[in-house]
Each structure stands twice: as structure tokens, then as C-alpha cells.
Image (cartoon, helix red, strand yellow):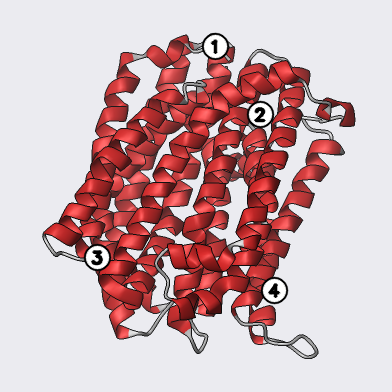
């Protein structure tokens, strides 16, 4: 028992371990435990917002505004994740080569480039918040109600990007505990501030939906401050000096080469989710849209920890390739697959057995609950395949082979999922149910393609 307690302490404290020589099972779990908790904390942001706004007077409008804004923000998430992929791949490879200074310089250049891009894009979200909601399928009344929420959330995109990106840097270095703790801090602040700013307390007025956006923005910003402390001041393996931020265009070119397909990879997926959200809203109305968004938030609460577990494959592949340990890299991936499948089986059973209870925690509207339950049950059919697919995608990305999953996503989401969802919902008149069915169908196809390409092994030839 003492042995397991010591192991968990090591994982939580982020003790530095040479992941290229440690036992593979231990290496996977040392990374996976804090990474899963980190991603669980990321999903808590949306769930906390959804819980409190779901109890507002205009709960249908509020839930729809939160869900549609999250769908649009997923484009920003895509950029952040794409850049964090480049950071993880470069940092992990340099750490595997035992070059921490080069890893730190790479990290600084990724932060610099990402900050500029995200800042420019966030301005458009601030200016066109209402129009964005209407474009997503919200009625004019719902768009008017939620525009301030959307404006604040889009304006905070830089904090969102930095939170993802810097955590990717720490994960690449093998220090997933700092990434986890930054999300803990951000979520504790959000959980405390959400009820205060939404409902009001003492001299603080009730801000309703707008208060949820302010609370989330403050929480994420505190998480970023914690990250920057460990990057710039604390004594860690990755230590960035101010002069590292001087533009290094040769290094930026390498970053763009890895990040561009990585961004496209997630933009492709995000745009597909945006289309599905719009299709549900137009074929099923506000209740269907709110139910679908509720189911998605619940699904992501459990999917993000699985994504965190699969991130272990990214770090282990990158570091082992840097150390020229190709067999260990592949063995690490398959070990991670095993753990992720077990986790997703448990989640599937949980959704089938306790779906009603979980949905009822966020809304008591009968129609919304019915749509959410239907969506949850259908989407959870493919959870095992999701778990395998995540690991495969992260293995490619950790190797710096960001193009392979990009082409897989393009085929799976745009060529298959979108036409299939449209066919089922419109042509066969299945409405939102047709959209729900298209999700596990596409994810299963994507997983099969990814697994076949991984076994072929071309990712082993990638240089970064």
C-alpha cells in the first residue's frame, strides 16, 4: 500500500524522471494521472457554467448561448491545441536529446507566435459576438441575451490559448503535475466566483450569464499566472529567459511547419462540431439544441480525462524518439491504448446506467432532458473507439507527424460525418437523432484509419 501511495505522490508532485529509461508502465501512469486530472479540470469550466446558468430564469437561452459559444471557441481551442502540439513535440524531442536549453528556447518562440495570432482573432469575436450566435443558429432573442457572454469569452481567448499552450510545454518536458495544478487553481477560482457573480452577493450585483463569463476569464487568467511563474522564475527543467522571446525566424518556421497541420487537424474537427450544432438547432429547435449542448458538456467532462491519458503517448513518443528508442515509443503507445480502453468502458457503463441522474443535475426541463438523454446514449456507443483513436492521434502528434491525423480528420469529419449527418437528419427526416448517430459512426471510422496507419510506422521517420 505504501508503494502505491509513494507512486501517486511522485505523480502529483511532478518529480522529474527520465521517461526514456523508466519502466514503461510507470512512465505512462506517472504522466497519465496528472494529465487526466488536468483535463478533468478543463472540462469542469463548462460544466460549472452550465450548472449555474441552467438555473437562470431564461435557462433555455442561457444554455444555448453557453453551448454555442463553446462551439465557436473550439476554433480558438484548435489553434491553442495545434500550437501546444508543436510545443509538446519540440520540447519532448529536445528533452529526449538531453538539451533543456533548446527546449526552453522552443517554448518561448511558440508562446510568442501564438500570442500574436490569438490576439488578432479574439478581436473579431469581441466585435461580432451577436452575429456569431445568429450564424450558429440562435434566434435573435437568444443572440441578444447571450452576446455579452460570448463577447467576454471571445475576448479572453489569449488566456485560453496560453493555458493550453503552456501546459503542452510542461507535458512535453514530462512535468504534467504543473499543468494539472494550474487547472486546479483556475477551476477553484471559477467555482467560487461563478455563483457570486451570477447571483450576486452583498455589494456585488447579480450579473446572470455575463457573470459566468467573467468568473471563467478570471479563473483561467490566474491559472496562466501560475504557469508563467514556473516558466520564468521557478527552478524547473524548462526555464525561459526574457531574451528567448526575441524572434527566431528559423525556429518559428519549424514551429509553423508542425503546428499548421495540427491547427488544421482540430479546426477540421471543430468546424464539423459547429456544423452539427447548427444542424441540431435548425432541425430540432431551442430545446434540442440545449439538450445536445448539455449532453456534449457531460460527454466532454469524461472525454477530456481520456484525452489527458492519451497525452501520455505524445510525450513518451517524442522523448523516446529523441533518445532514438523507437521500440519503447511504440510499446508506450500500446500500453496507453490499453489503459484508455478500460477507462472508456467504465464511462460507457456510467452513461447508460446514470444518464438520467447526470442530466437532471443541469436541467429539469423535460424536453431538454429527453434530447440530452437520447444524445448521450447514442454518442456513448462509440466511446471505446474514441479512446483508441485519441491515443493514435496523440502518438502521431508527439512524433511531429501532424499531417497524418489531419488527413484522417478531413476524411472522417468533412467527407463522411457532415454529409452523413445531413442525410440522416434532413433527407431521412430523423432530425437531431440523425446528427447524434453520425458522431459515433465517424469516430469509429477515424479510429480504424488511424490504427492502420500507425501500425505502418511511417511516423518513425519524422524529424523535428
Residue 331 image-quadrant placement:
top left
Considering the numbered disc 4 on the image, is that residue within a helix, a strand or a loop? Answer: helix
- Considering depth in this image, is 82 or 98 the residue closer to the camera? 82
Considering the numbered disc 2 on the image, is that residue within a helix, a strand or a loop? Answer: loop
Mark 4–mark 3 Cα distance, whole angstroms, equals: 34 Å
Name the N-terminal-most of marks 2 and 3: 2
Residue 152 horizontal/vertical position (percent) = 66, 65
Mark 2–mark 4 Cα distance, whole angstroms, equals: 32 Å
Name the N-terminal-most of marks 2 and 4: 2
Name the N-terminal-most of marks 1 and 3: 3
Mark 1–mark 3 Cα distance, whole angstroms, equals: 44 Å
Residue 402 horizontal/vertical position (percent) = 47, 26
Residue 119 horizontal/vertical position (percent) = 70, 47
- Considering depth in this image, is 105 or 290 the residue closer to the camera? 290
Q: Which residue is mark 3?
A: 432
Q: Are marks 2 and 3 in contact (CB under 8 Å)?
A: no
Mark 4–mark 1 Cα distance, whole angstroms, equals: 45 Å
Name the N-terminal-most of marks 1 and 2: 2
Q: Are marks 4 and 1 in contact (CB under 8 Å)?
A: no
Q: Which residue is mark 1?
A: 463
Mark 1–mark 2 Cα distance, whole angstroms, equals: 18 Å
- Considering depth in this image, is 47 or 324 the residue closer to the camera? 47
Q: Which residue is mark 2?
A: 173
Q: Which residue is mark 4?
A: 193
- Report the mark closest to the observer, 2 or 3: 3
Task: Identify the residue shown where x is 57% and y is 22%.
Answer: 257
- Report the mark closest to the observer, 2 or 4: 4
Quadrant in which the C terminus is drawn = top right
Task: Identify the residue shown where x is 44% and y is 63%.
Answer: 135
Residue 282 horizontal/vertical position (percent) = 30, 68
Amino acid at each position: 500500500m505504501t508503494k502505491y501511495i509513494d507512486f501517486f505522490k511522485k505523480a502529483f508532485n511532478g518529480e522529474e524522471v527520465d521517461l526514456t529509461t523508466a519502466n514503461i508502465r510507470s512512465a505512462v501512469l506517472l504522466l497519465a494521472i496528472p494529465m487526466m486530472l488536468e483535463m478533468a479540470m478543463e472540462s469542469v469550466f463548462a460544466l460549472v457554467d452550465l450548472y449555474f446558468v441552467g438555473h437562470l430564469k431564461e435557462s433555455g437561452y442561457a444554455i444555448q448561448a453557453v453551448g454555442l459559444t463553446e462551439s465557436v471557441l473550439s476554433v480558438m481551442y484548435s489553434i491553442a491545441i495545434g500550437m501546444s502540439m508543436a510545443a509538446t513535440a519540440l520540447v519532448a524531442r529536445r528533452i529526449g536529446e538531453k538539451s533543456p536549453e533548446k527546449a526552453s528556447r522552443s517554448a518561448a518562440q511558440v508562446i510568442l507566435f501564438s500570442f500574436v495570432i490569438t490576439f488578432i482573432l479574439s478581436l473579431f469575436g469581441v466585435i461580432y459576438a451577436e452575429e456569431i450566435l445568429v450564424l450558429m443558429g440562435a434566434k435573435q432573442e437568444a443572440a441578444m441575451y447571450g452576446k455579452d457572454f460570448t463577447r467576454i469569452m471571445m475576448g479572453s481567448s489569449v488566456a485560453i490559448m496560453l493555458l493550453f499552450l503552456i501546459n503542452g510545454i510542461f507535458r512535453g518536458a514530462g512535468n504534467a503535475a504543473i499543468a494539472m495544478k494550474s487547472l486546479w487553481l483556475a477551476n477553484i477560482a471559477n467555482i467560487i466566483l461563478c455563483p457570486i457573480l451570477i447571483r450576486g452577493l452583498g455589494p456585488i450585483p447579480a450579473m446572470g450569464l455575463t457573470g459566468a463569463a467573467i468568473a471563467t476569464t478570471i479563473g483561467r487568467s490566474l491559472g496562466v499566472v501560475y504557469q508563467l511563474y514556473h516558466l520564468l522564475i521557478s527552478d524547473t527543467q524548462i526555464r525561459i529567459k526574457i531574451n528567448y522571446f526575441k524572434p527566431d525566424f528559423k525556429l518559428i518556421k519549424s514551429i509553423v511547419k508542425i503546428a499548421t497541420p495540427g491547427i488544421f487537424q482540430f479546426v477540421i474537427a471543430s468546424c464539423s462540431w459547429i456544423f452539427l450544432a447548427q444542424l441540431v438547432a435548425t432541425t430540432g429547435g431551442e430545446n434540442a439544441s440545449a439538450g445536445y449542448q448539455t449532453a456534449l458538456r457531460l460527454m466532454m467532462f469524461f472525454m477530456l480525462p481520456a484525452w489527458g491519458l492519451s497525452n501520455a503517448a505524445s510525450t513518451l513518443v517524442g522523448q523516446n524518439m529523441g533518445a532514438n528508442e523507437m521500440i519503447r515509443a511504440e510499446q508506450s503507445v500500446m500500453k496507453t491504448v490499453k489503459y484508455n480502453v478500460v477507462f472508456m468502458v467504465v464511462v460507457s457503463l456510467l452513461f447508460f446506467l446514470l444518464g438520467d441522474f447526470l442530466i437532471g443535475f443541469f436541467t429539469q426541463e423535460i424536453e431538454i432532458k429527453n434530447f440530452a438523454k437520447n444524445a448521450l446514449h447514442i454518442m456513448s456507443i462509440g466511446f471505446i473507439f474514441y479512446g483508441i483513436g485519441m491515443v493514435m492521434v496523440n502518438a502521431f502528434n508527439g512524433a511531429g507527424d501532424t499531417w497524418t491525423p489531419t488527413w484522417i480528420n478531413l476524411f472522417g469529419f468533412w467527407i463522411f460525418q457532415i454529409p452523413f449527418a445531413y442525410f440522416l437528419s434532413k433527407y431521412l427526416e430523423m432530425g437531431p437523432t440523425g446528427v447524434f448517430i453520425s458522431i459515433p459512426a465517424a469516430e469509429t471510422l477515424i479510429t480504424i484509419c488511424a490504427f492502420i496507419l500507425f501500425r505502418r510506422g511511417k511516423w518513425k521517420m519524422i524529424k523535428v
